[in-house]
Image: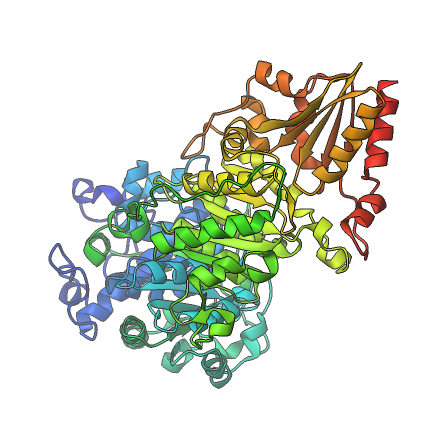
Amino acid sequence: MSAMPDTPLESLPAFCEGIQYFADTLPELDRLAAAPLLGPDTPTLPDPTSEAAVYQTLLAADALRYLTLQITGSKSSGHPGGFASSADAVAALHLLGHRNVVTEVGHHAPGFYSAMFLDTSLEAMGIQSVSDMRTRFREMHGLLGHLSGAIPGLLAPAGPLGQGQHFAMAGALLHRDKLFPVTIGDGGLGEPYIMSAFQHFATAYPDVTNYLPVLVWNGYSQEHHSMVSLWDNARMTAYWRAHGFDEVHLVDARDFADTDAPGYPDQGPTMSAYADSTTFGFAARMAFTGAILKAADAAAKSALSGRRACLIVKQLKGAGVHATGAKSHNLYAHHTLDSDDVKGGLQRRALPIQAWRVTRENFRHAGGGPAAKVAVTETERALPDLGTLPLKEFPMGENAVPTTAFGAVVGEVGKRDASFVVSNADGNEASGMANINQALTIRHPTADALYFQGPAGQVYEPLNEDACAGLAAGLALFGGRSLWCSYESFAINGLPIWQTVTQAMAELRRKTPATVCLFTAGALEQGRNGWTHQRPEIESYFAAMMRNGNVYPLFPVDANMIQASYDWALKQHNKGVVITASKSPLPVRTTLAQGEAAIAQGAIVLQENAGKKTVVFAVTGDMVLLPVFAAAEALKQAGIGSRIVAVVNPRRLYRPHDVLWSSVSEPDGTFLGDAEFNALFDGDALIAVTGGPSAMLEPVLLRTRAAKRDTYCWKRGETTASAQQLFDFNGMNADALAARATAMLA
């Protein structure tokens, strides 16, 4: 082992600058790695069963392990252990030419970055060498601590566990000729979403099988033995088969062990079933790597030919880094490149210069080139032109159901874009949008005309908000149009994946359709269902997210404006657009043109009554306008003036410095100017009214010049017989509003 290579420095490849240790040689290096197997005309291993293919895959896995430990050690921060167990499978998939790899494990970030470094993708960030990678890891505008889709070559972010499967399935649906492996860890397998999402998707899309779950079964979650550490191979195989997988390819490192892993601490009870292949002798390591390569190749071919397959690698967590088990998960301040454990791990994984050259060339040519050039998310996906959508103009003054008007437009979008998907865990019919099902059909293998259901439908309706949000958000991220619908009360169950994707869109280097949502059946419409269905608090999340720079909650006031809202959302890129509306018949208060103007400006005056003094009602929502208009009428009878202003697009009402808009990938710096804002909201008093939490009205309350102001908002739910009773219960009825306005103006 040498800290510096024996080869003259001038012959050291430039990308190797910053590598701390090099091995002098390895067994069979000259025979099996004299030249890389991949090249410009060879994007995949010519013969995965050959001795050279196995050997060069082994080198690739150790290169990934070495880089993962070196870059995390350089910052005494990060997570090397989980990825280390998967390195053999990840290396095999890349060298087999599969470059569209995603993960549900954000902790695998340094390993994924290492793969992108080896294939030269990170050069797009100015990262040319290992030294550059060490410098940029976990630093601002560098390699984020957890996976981000902003990194060249990486397809998707990784936020909370249990999300990566959505990206794999969305990619598979939009790109049927490519494989989308997704790595999953022990901890993630404890999430309820992963297997249910696979099952829902397989039911709706039984012919889409070109995604490949890769379970890294290493016996541990973050800080302790995992739930599945107690399972044996038969039980794990049965578990995947029970969830509909046709093939389970399980490779257990213990089957190839020729050592009891000397030098590593005892892992404690039950852990004898897990082995670290990097401690095996050369022949045993080759046998294990060969088994991984064979299984990965077989599973990939099956997935691409119509069979649901999974790959399971059973190997001790931390294989080949500084520690094993849960102790390998995280690095702390005492873990430096000079600490004995990290130094020892690097020295054990050190490679000769020739091995680095071969590995670099193999990664650079795998799959036809660097992932930053060949991954499906590195280019904008072409979309059908929707043309001018047929928006229906409802007459002013009549009653119409906003969601039904919305549904008619959605149906037309689906007819014009065959890849468009609508997802709804709560049912479109229950949300006043049966017309969507009639136009596009619920997707299910069982055709049933009674339920507008069939195998080719564009409506995805599992009773699972995470599955619905995940597929819709994943499709948007991967370049497809989609719509996620939900009862507002239950949308929180799908929010984590939507939030992850939307935040990732703010960083993307390419345009992609906005993530569009419709939340309906709001608290005021759920009287008889009680407080379990009356949870508008999710609006506070979106209110906070408005300051991110690319999140736009919209509150259309009627059937015309909701159509204008959706038409606007369809034209946006890299944004999160959340439309909240009612499924009840409500008065039409605006024209289509007025709706478009309100969205562009942020707000619109719905009514103005002259009087000796003026109270301004700043309102978000549609149903909540009912008591506001009644209060304005009572004030009018008392000679008090009022102005009702619908806050439709509150993000537009912030000041430019309130929002981090300039740093997002598709910056939108449109904000309502002071003069225009004051023309809307100036008065002797201002009352902010909302059917949800008050946070959404922060932009108005920040800027208003009214000397007196108050807020009326949702407090909590109750079982009632009507919306009016809920208004009464929350102190938001017309009498309360009028009385407060009168008192404020006295």
Q: Is residue 6 above or below residue 465?
A: above
Number of labels in the image equals 0
| Residue at figure coordinates x 52%, y 32% from the top left | 599
Q: Can residue 427 be seen in this view?
A: no
Q: Is residue 701 visible?
A: yes
Q: In this view, does 138 lie above or below 170?
A: above
Looking at this rendering, what residue extends furthest in the left direction? Answer: 41
Residue 281 or 287: which is nearer the viewer?
287
Residue 417 or 104: which is nearer the viewer?
417
Q: In which quarter of the image is the N terminus?
A: bottom left
Tell me where residue 446 sits by quadrant: bottom left
Image position of 178 (left or right of 662): left
Image position of 585 (left or right of 579): right
Residue 503 or 315: which is nearer the viewer?
503
Looking at this rendering, what residue extends furthest in the bottom direction? Answer: 234
Q: Position of residue 218 (x, y in %)?
A: 48, 70
Q: Position of residue 14 (x, y in %)?
A: 22, 41
Q: Where is residue 586 in the image (x, y as percent from the top left)?
A: 65, 44
Q: In which quarter of the image is the C terminus?
A: top right
| Residue at figure coordinates x 87%, y 29% from the top left | 739
| Residue at figure coordinates x 24%, y 62% from the top left | 95
Image position of 140 (left or right of 537): left
Q: Where is residue 465 in the image (x, y as percent from the top left)?
A: 57, 60
Image position of 248 (left or right of 408): left
Q: How is the image coloured?
A: rainbow
